[in-house]
Image: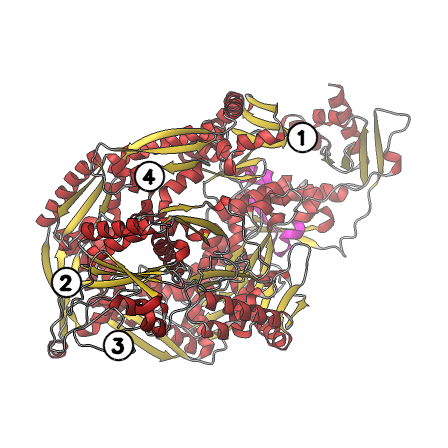
Amino acid sequence: MPTPAEIIAARVNNSLDEAANSATSDVTTESADDYSYSSNSAAQDDQESVATSASARSISDESAFPALGGGKKSPSVSGTSTPSWGPSMKTPISGSPSPALRAKSPATPAPKATNGNRFKVSTIQEAFSLDVEDQLNVARPEFIKILTTVKADTNTNIECTTSQHTKKRTFLITGKPEDVKTAKRIVIKKLTKPVTSVFTVPAKIRSRIIGPQGKTLKPIIQENDVKIDIGNVEETPEVSDENEDEDDIFAQTIKITIDGDVEGCKRAKSLILAIVKEETKNLTAKIKVDDLVKPFAGSALKSIIAKYSDLDISIPDYKTSSNTILISGNRELALQAKSEINEALSALSGKIVVEEVPIPKVKHQFLPISSILEEENVLIKLPAEGESNVKFIGEKKKLAAAKEKARQTTSAYKVEVLDMSKAHKGNLKHVKAVAALLNKNGVFKEIASSHDVSINVPSIKTLSDESIASIPIEIVSKNDDAEQIKNVRKAIVQVVNKITPDQTKVVEDIDPFFLAKVPETIKDAAKQNKVSYVILGKQITLFSDEQEQESEDFDFVESADSTSAFAKVDESLNSLRELASNLEAVVLSVPAKDQAVISGPRGTTLKSILNDVEANSVTVKFHSNGEKNSDDEIYIHGVKSEVAKVKKDIAAVLADAQEYKEGYSATVSVPSGTLSRLIGKSGAHLNAIRDQFGVKIDVSDEGKDDDKKDASSKTDIVISGIKRNVEQAKADIHNQAKKLADETLTRIKIESQYHRRMIGQNGIYINRLQDKYNVKIRFPSVDGANGSAFADAPKTKDEVTIKGPSKGVAKAEEELKELYQFEKENGFKETIKIPTKAIARVIGKSGETINDIADGSGIEYKFKRDTESEESLGYAEVELTGSKSALKEATKKIQEIIEEIENFASVTIKVDPKYHRDLIGQGGSVMKEIISKAGGDDLPRSKYFRLLSIPNEGSGSDEVTSQGDKSIVDKVIEQVNKIVANKVASISEDFELAKEKHRLIVGPSGSIRHSLQEEFGASIDIPRPSDASTTIKLSGLPENVEALKAKIIELTKDDWNLSIDIPEAYHALVSEKGAIFKKLKSDFNVEVQHGNLTRQAAKLSSSSIPTPPEEAFAVDDAATKFTIVDNTVVDESDGVVIPWRLKGSAESTAKAAKLIEERLANAKAAKSVGWFYSKNPSVFSKIVGPQGSKINQIRKKTNTFITVPRANDKNPNFVYLIGSEENLEKAKSEIEHALKN
C-alpha cells in the first residue's frame, strides 16, 4: 500500500497508476525519521495544499485528495512558461507555476466543523516537488544530513520520495504553519541551483513596482530572499511592433532581472506581475481628428460613448486647438472603442461638405454659431484673413436649414456705423487717441448700457495702425428703432466733441524701448493733475479730465487751458528721456551651439539673467546682430549699465559651461521633517522648482524614510544642471526649507456662531489678517463637516486653525482672539415679525435677499417657520444675531421690504393710444416729469420704470399701468388722468406771427417757449427757421389758448419809434458796411432792426466792393492812380426797400433819423465812382488812421462814401469811393495828403 507521501506525489504528478506502483520499483522513500500522520491536521494553501482527516477515504476521492491547483487539472509542468510583457501580450496575466517547481502555497485554515465550531489548526502538511534539472548534485548522506538539520532547526517532520523514471523529488513537510514555511524555504535554498529570471514590464509602471521610497519592492525582496534589478527606461530599446498601438502608454518596456532560488524567483515574479496586472488593466488611447470633422465628432460618436459607458471618452470642443480624442479605461475595451471610433470618423468624413456664403462683415458678430451647431449639427466658420465668405460646414441635407436660421438671426440686428474720423476737422491721430481713451475708461460701455445697445470699437492694435484712415464705431441694436440709434450717435458725438485737441498733449520723444515703462512712470503725476493717457504706437496722448460743454455735432469747442497739468505729467517722463541717452546696443560673438547654454532649458537661464537687472531695461535676441539674423551672434539692447551686467552674466555662464563640461551639481541639506512638504503632493513643489530653474533634482533615499523622527536629521538634495541655475535653485530650496522648518500650527476654540462675522463679507477681515502676517487661517466648512484634504483643517465646528511662520502665527492668534472677544461682547439678538405675504420677498430667490442683508450688515439670521402658526397669526419670525449697529441696519432693510410689500399697489387704466405720445413727451420728458412730481426720482432703476408703463406704439394696447408704492402710484394715475382730460378738451388754433418775431417766443435754447408752455398749460408748435411759414400752432384748453395768445401778443408787440425805408441799392452805402449801426448805438443809444429782411440787410452790409474797371489799373508801374467813372443809375421803383426801425428814446431816434436821412441823400446824389490805386496796399493804414479816425475825417470833410480794402479782400490795391465828382476830387486830395504825411 502506498504511503501518504507516495499518494501526494502521485497527485502532484497527476498519475494514480504511478502512485499505485510507487511502493515497488518507481518510488524510493528517503526520510530522516519515520513518517507519523496526525489525524486532526489540515492543510490548505493559496496555490497548493494537502488536507487529511481521521476517516479513511479512497485515493480516487477528489474531496479527500484533490488534484494540485484546485478542482481543474493543472497544466503540464514541463510545458508551462510565463510570458514577458510585450506587444503580443494584450491582457496582463499573473505568472503560472515555474517549470522547476510545482508547489502548494501555505495552507489555509481548516473548514468549519458541523457543530459550528472551527477546528484549531495546530499542524499542517505541505507538499512540493523539485525537477531534476533544478536540483543540486548532493550525495545521499549529505542529502539526509540537510533534511535532518532542517527538521531539527524548524521542529518539523520531512519526508521525501523520488521517482525512478524522472528523478523528481517530492517533499511532504508536517508542522506548525510558520515552521513549515521556514523549512520549505531552507530545503529549496539548499537543494536547488541558483536561477535567474528575466522578463519585461511596462516602463510606465516602474515607479509603482518600486513604490514610495521602495515600500513595495523591499518586502518582495526580503520575503523571497532574492535580488531584483529593475532596468531604467533608457536602458531598454523601445518596442517597435507594427501591430502595437502607437498610443498605448504601456508599449515601452523595461527589463527586470531576479536572482535567487527557484521558489523565491517564482514568487517574486508572481508578485511583480500581479502589480503589473492591476496597473495595466486601464489604458489611455488617443485618436487624431481632422479639423473639418472635429465639430461633429460629439454627435456622431454618441452611440459609441453610450455603448462603452465604462470608458471615459473625451472629445475636444471645436473651439479648442486640441485635435485629439482621449479614451481612458479598461485596456481591451479602450482598444475596441478606438477601432469603432476610427471607423465612425472615417464614415463621417465622407459626408461633410463646405458651402461658402457671402455675408456682410458687420453681421458676422451676430451669427449664432453655437446654437446652430447644437441644433442643426452645422458649423459656421468665419472667414480667415484674406477670405471674404462665411463657410457652412456639415452634412449637405442640413446646410439649407442652418443658413436660413443664420439669416433670420442676423436680420434681427441693425448695425449703424459712425465714422469718428471726420471729428475735430479730420485730425485723425487725435480722434484715434480719443477712441482709445473712451474705450479704456468705459464711456462707450456706459453709453451702450444706458441705451440698451452694443457698441464695437476698433482695438488698440487697429488704432495704432497709421495706414488706417477710418475709425468705424459700430452701434448694434436688436430692433429698428431709429430714435434709439439717433440718441446713441448723439451721445457719442457729444462726448467726442468734448475732448478737443487743445485738451490734449502729444508726447512723441520717448524711446520705444521705454514705452512699457510709461504707465508706471506717470501714474502718480497723471492722477494728481487729473490727466488721462493712451499709448498708440510710439505716441503718448495726454488728456485733460475737465468736463466741457456738450454739442450735437462734431464741432470745434473751446476748452480750458490744461498746459500746466500736461507740463507736470510730461515732466515726470524726463526720467525715461534721461535713460534713453544711456541706451546701448551690443553684439556678442557666441557660437550658435553655445547660445543654447545661455538660453538654458526652456529659457530659464536667460530669464534668470534678466531677472537680475531692472525690469524691461534690457532685451536679448539670439542669432541676431540687431539688423538681421546671424547664427553666431547675440544682440543685446538696453540701458548701458544693465547691458553691462547682462554681458558679464553671459560671460560667466559661458565660462561655467566650459569649466563644467560634464555638468554641474550641488547639494543642499534640508531638515527631513520638511521634506514631504518641500516635495509637495505628487512632487508638485519640487517639479515647479525644476521647471523654474531648468535643473535636475534628486532626493536622497535615506531622507524619504518616514520612520525618521529625529528633528535634527537632515536630507541631502542633489541639484544638477547649468551652474547659475543650480545655485539659484539651491538658494530657493534652502529658503523654502527654512520657511517650512519655522512653520507652526495653532488651533483656537471659537464658537461657530461668531465665525461669519469674524470672517467678514467676502472674507475681508480674515484676508487682511492673512496678508498682514503671511499665515493661513482656516474656519470649519459651512455644513459642519470635519473631513478635509488639508492637514491644518479644523477638527470640530468650533475650531479655527492658524498655520504659518511662528511669529506671524503668534501675532495673528493674538488679533484673532481680540476680534473673538469683541464679537462675544456684541452678540445681541432681536426678533422681527414678518407678514406672510412679505416672507418670500425678504428671503429672495434661493435666499439671495436675506443673505445679502446678512453679509452686508454682518448679522446671523434664523427663521422660525411653522405653517399652521403662520396661517393663523399671519406672520413668521426671524431671529437676528449681531452687534447693535448691525442689528439696526439689518432691521431697517427688512422693514423697508415689508413696508414696500404692504404699501404696494398696481393700477391699470385705459387710455386711447392717440394720447400715449402726449404722456411720453419728447425723449420721455413728460413721463419723467409725471414720475418726478409723484416723488419717484430716488427709486432704484428697476422700480422707477414700473411706476409708469405705456404700451409701445403699434402694439394695439390701450392699457397704462403704474406699480409701486401706493402713494406714488395714486399721484401718477392722477396726473395721467389730468393730462388725458386736458388733451380731450384741448383745441388747436393757428396764430399768425411775423417770422422775425418767432425768436421772441423761443428764447435761448427754447427757454421762453418752455416757460410759456408750463405757465399756460398749452403747447406751442413753431415752424423751423428754414420754413418760410409765419403760422404758429397753439394747442390746449380754450381758456389757456386765449391767455397764451394775449401773452404772445404782449411779448411780440413793436417797440420801435421811427421807421425809415432805405432802397436796397443804397443800404450798403448808408450803413457803411454795418459800421453805422455801431455809431448809432454809441452816439445816440439807438438800435436798428430790419424786421423780416434782417438777413438780407446783413448780407448787403457785408457785400464786397465791385470789380474795378480796366482803366482804374496803373500803367508803367505807377505807384498810385486815381480814376473817376460814372455811377450806375438806380431805379428805385423796382428795388426792394429795407426798413430801418429805430429803437430808443424819441429824442435819440429823431437825431439818428436825421443822420440816416442825410446819408441817404448823399447816396442818392452820388453820381460818380472813384478808384484809388496803390501799388503798395500797406500804405492804406495811413488813410485809416488810429481806430479809423483819419478815414472818418475824410468821409465827413468830403461828404463821400469811402471803403478801404482788407488784406484778404479780392482787390486789396483799390480804395473804393462814391460821391459827386467834385467831392471825389476833394477826397483824392485828402488821401494823397495823408499818404505824404
| Region rendered in magenta | 1077-1097
Q: Mark 1 — residue?
A: 627
| Amino acid on which the number 2 mark rests in the picture | Ser
Q: Main secondary structure of the magenta part?
A: helix
Q: Nearer the viewer, mark 1 or mark 3?
A: 3
- Quadrant where the C terminus lies? top right
Q: Do the residues labelled 3 and 2 touch (CB within 8 Å)?
A: no
Mark 2: secondary structure: loop
Give the CA separation, mark 3 to mark 2.
22 Å
For residue 122, the mark is 2
Q: Could one spot residue 605 in this view of the protein?
A: yes
Q: Count residues near mark 3 (Cα–Cα under 10 Å), then give few for <14, some for 14-19, many for 20+.
A: few
| Amino acid on which the number 3 mark rests in the picture | Ser
Whichever of labels 4 and 2 marks the residue nearer the N terminus, that label is 2
Q: Is residue 617 above or below residue 942?
A: above
Q: Mark 3 — residue?
A: 63
List x then y, in percent, for residue 1074: 64, 42
List x then y, in percent, for residue 838: 21, 71
For residue 701, the mark is 4
Mark 4: secondary structure: helix
Nearer to us in this view, 580 or 347? 347
Q: Do the residues labelled 3 and 4 touch (CB within 8 Å)?
A: no
- Residue 1080 lies in the magenta-colored region: yes
Give the CA separation, mark 4 to mark 2.
42 Å
Nearer to us in this view, 1018 or 475? 475
